[in-house]
Image (spheres, helix red, strand yellow):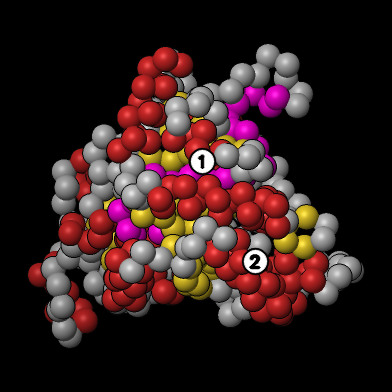
Amino acid sequence: MTIQVQKDEGLYYRQTLFDKAKRVVVKVGSAILTDRDGMNREVIRNLAREISFLHNSGREVILVTSGAVAAGKKKIAFIPHGEISLREKQAFAAIGQSCLMQTYEEAFSQHKKNIAQILLTHSDLADRDRYLNVRNTIMTLFRFGVIPIINENDTVSVEELRFGDNDTLGALITNLIEADMFICLTDVVGLYNGNPQTDPAARPIYTIAEITPEIENMAASIKSDAGTGGMQSKIRAAKMVAAGGGSSFIGPGREENILQSLFGGELVGTFFLPRKEKMQSRKHWISYVLKPKGSLVLDDGACLAIARQGRSLLPSGIRAVEGDFGVGDSVRCVDKNNTVVAVGLINYNAHDVGQIQGCRSDQIFDILGFKDSDEVIHRDNLVVL
């Protein structure tokens, strides 16, 4: 059964959270920002006016933007012949990023707003110290009254350094700075209970209390020609934000005065309520920011111990080791059916875990010649999924 709230009740919840929101992340994608001539300056001017409206209301605002690659391709009138290579994409980002920021600078200057550019790769957030440094930089910009504009650093990103899409980046930034709200402006009007293009009975869902598998299945996998994320990635982003205690919105980015309409109480788009129990910041980082480097197959007893009893993972419960990981890497814990039970930071490398799997903790020293910990993953570094 779809978990959502009635229209009147949903409007109350939405408006309460909009009124209370003091720190907001706005994400806008390439499909909104670009057109056949390159940057869609009319959309960017409207976006700058809307974000300035939020800023003038006393809120702290971050803009997470796409558009550099698309702007670069259109700036040099690139005509693709087959799939675009990584080198070409990086070059397009280098060409388009300056154009993108110049357009934003001109648009925000009309409202006497100062902006700052922050380019990130996944490794900037995967390293805990750098993760906190990014947060400190953003907080300092807030103190200066500056609006940070964040984009993935596509010029240097390779597959292992990528976020995947800017929906994910926006959600991670929302939780990084503990923002109250994540607003995803896109080329759709919101989530429907069916495909409105093929099902005349499909109706919009205005407010969702919990993102269930049924809600996730509603998300179409169709992607925009200019963007990298479809509705499924936006739902995943909203789920990440909800786990961190924030609310999310998905709605039409080309609609004039969209942010003023939202904060003014108009019922548009789809709104996602925060989870009742907020995940701890560090565990959220382990669960959503880090990319697992391998997997441990656990027996039924170990699955029960970590999932239901809050225990650490001991070597005796491990049945198989998959992947090549080092000490401190993120590793999945899966059951015999390969269902992910938990994810955590490992205390031993893959080779050593393979040596001690199935053994008691008091046998670790005799097998390895050293013992750094009784636990393969300590419960403080373990997130049950």
Q: Which residues fall within the magenta stretch?
A: 170-196
Instruction: State the CA–CA distance, disc 2 to disc 1.
Output: 20 Å
Residue 172 magenta-highlighted: yes
Inspect the image, locate mark 1, and give the three-letter code of the amino acid beneath it: Leu
Residue 185 image position (x, y, % from top left): 57, 45
In the rendered image, which residue does mark 1 sit on?
259
- What residue appears at the point 57 percent right and 39 percent down from the top-left corner? 257
Callout 1: few (<14), some (14-19), or many (20+) C-alpha neighbours within 10 Å?
many
- Residue at image x 70%, y 24%? 196
> Is residue 273 covered in magenta?
no
Front position in the image: 35 or 218: 35
Residue at image coords 57%, 60%: 110
- In the image, what residue occupies the spot 23% across and 52% down? 280
Image coords of residue 381 (percent x, y): 23, 61
Viewer-closest of 352 and 265? 265
Q: 25 or 111: which is nearer to us?
A: 111
